[in-house]
Image (cartoon, grey):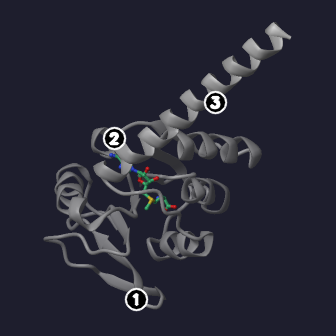
Amino acid sequence: MLALTITAYAVGIVLLGCGSAILLSMQIARKSAAPFFPSAKSTVRLALAAADLRPGESFYDLGAGTGASIVVADREFGARAIGSEISILPYLLAKIRIFLSRSKAKMRFEDLFNEDVRDADVVFCFLAERVLGRVAEKLRKELKPGARIVSYAFTLPGMVPERTIPVHGAWKLYLYRISGTGR
Ligand SMILES: C[S@@+](CC[C@H](N)C(=O)[O-])C[C@H]1O[C@@H](n2cnc3c(N)ncnc32)[C@H](O)[C@@H]1O
């Protein structure tokens, strides 16, 4: 009986610890660049088609959530897909999604501002408006000429979109291209 009570307490403490860690990491992510709010797969497909993502190209989702875009980029577009995420629950769900869909996409538990995107052909982001100035500055500094960016919901400050793609209601995708040579 005592053993059972101790086990129950131990399980309770572990669950409480895990729950607190998940809530804390979600709070950190919300304060950092955006809360978790997943894009529909249809939106992701629209974004990747608009960016003309080709087989073998490098694709990054900065703040990849549960990994829908990187799995679609890998499985349906044949791209080398990488996602970065700092919230533990979406990160783990993305790893499970990658495993279950037998995808070669890579998910990194990393702050998007530390992600090196110099080899990216296409970058997707769905982030809070308040951080997009910093994101745009990073992308302008790192991306090669011809690289495309698709921002969902908000425009990138200081950059002019090549195309605006309506999704539903007021929600739009904004496609940008880094100027210079490249396609
Ligand atoms: C609006 S959700 C979009 C998720 C995914 N890109 C999609 O479209 O379904 C934004 C994601 O960014 C993550 N995030 C917020 N700040 C971050 C940071 N500094 N580095 C990496 N991920 C971050 C959040 O945890 C959340 O999962």
Q: Can residue 119 be seen in this view?
A: no
The vertical placement of 126 against 75, above or below, is: below
Relative vertical location of residue 171 with respect to residue 115 in this rendering, above or below: below
- Residue in front for this viewpoint, 30 or 110: 30
Residue marked by disc 2: 115
At which x and y percent is residue 3?
A: 81, 8
The label number, if any, that marks residue 15 in the structure image: 3
Label 2 sits on what residue type? Glu
The residue shown at (51%, 52%) is 65
The amino acid type found where label 3 is placed reads: Leu
Within 10 Å of disc 3 (Cα), the crowding (few <14, some 14-19, many 20+) is: few
Precedes in sequence: disc 1 or disc 2: 2
In the rendered structure, which amino acid carries the disc numbered 1?
Ala
Say left or right for 103 vs 125.
right
Secondary structure state at the residue bearing disc 3: helix
Q: How crowded is mark 2: few (under 14 residues within 10 Å), some or many (20 or more)?
A: some
Percent x, y for residue 170? 40, 89
Image coords of residue 73 (percent x, y): 57, 58
Front residue of this view, candidates 112 and 55:
112
Residue at image location 67% in from the left, 17% down from the top? 10
Measure the C-alpha gap from mark 1 to mark 3.
Answer: 40 Å
Q: Does the residue labelled 3 lie within 8 Å of ligand 1?
A: no
- Residue at (55% x, 47% y) in the render: 90
Q: What residue appears at the point 67 percent right and 56 percent down from the top-left corner? A: 75
Q: Does the residue labelled 2 lie within 8 Å of ligand 1?
A: yes
- The secondary element bearing badge 1 is classed as loop
- The mark found on residue 170 in the picture is 1
Name the front one of labels 2 and 3: 3
